[in-house]
Image (cartoon, rainbow, N blue to C red):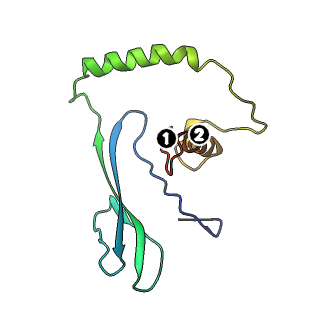
Amino acid sequence: TSKNNTITTTKVFNSGTDFRNLSFLKIWLNNTTKESSPTTTSSRSSASGGGGGGGCVPLQPIVHWTQLDVTSEYEEDNEVANIVQQFEKEMSDKVDKEICTIHWELDVQSETVRSQEVAIGNFVTDAMKKKMKADCALVNP
C-alpha cells in the first residue's frame, strides 16, 4: 500500500457496519516463485508480494474474504448469547480502570474510525502486537 508517497506493508481490511455484516478473513502465507504465484480474479480476493525478477517471493500473502449479511433470517444462538453476557459482565469492572495517560487527542468517532486509518487503531493494534509478541493484530472498531 502507499501512503504519503511512502510504501508500507500494512494491509487494511475494512468490512461491514455496526453488526449488519459478518466477515470471514483467511490469510495464507505462500512461499512461491513469482511465475507460479496464484492469481485471483474475484473482487474479494487479493494476492500481493514484493520483489522483482523471477526469484522466490518469500511468504507472499494471499487474502480471501467473504461477507455474510446479518438479518432476521438467522436466530440468536442462546449459548453464544449467554457467553457474551457473561463476558460483558466480567469486562465491565475491568474497563473502568485508568491504565495510561496519552498527551494527544484520539479521535474515536464512528465516522472517523470506520472510514480511515486513525491513531487509536494504530495504538490498540500496536499494544496488542507487543503484548502477544505477534506479527499481526486485527481490530474491529
Disc 2: which residue: 124
Q: Residue 13, percent across and down?
A: 45, 51
Please give the name of the residue rendered at 58% of the width and 50% of the height, measured from the top-left corner: 117
Q: What residue type is labelled 2?
A: Val
Given residues 101 and 55, the one toward you in this image is: 55
Q: Residue 5, percent across and down?
A: 64, 70
| Sequence-wise first label, 2 or 1 | 2
Secondary element at tag 2: helix
In the rendered image, the residue lying farthest to the bottom is 53
Given residues 81 and 36, the one toward you in this image is: 36
Please give the name of the residue rendered at 60% of the width and 40% of the height, measured from the top-left corner: 127
In the rendered image, the residue lying farthest to the right is 103
Disc 1: which residue: 139
Secondary element at tag 1: loop
Please give the name of the residue rendered at 57% of the width and 18% of the height, measured from the top-left corner: 94
Please give the name of the residue rendered at 43% of the width and 19% of the height, measured from the top-left corner: 87
Q: In which quarter of the image is residue 128?
A: top right
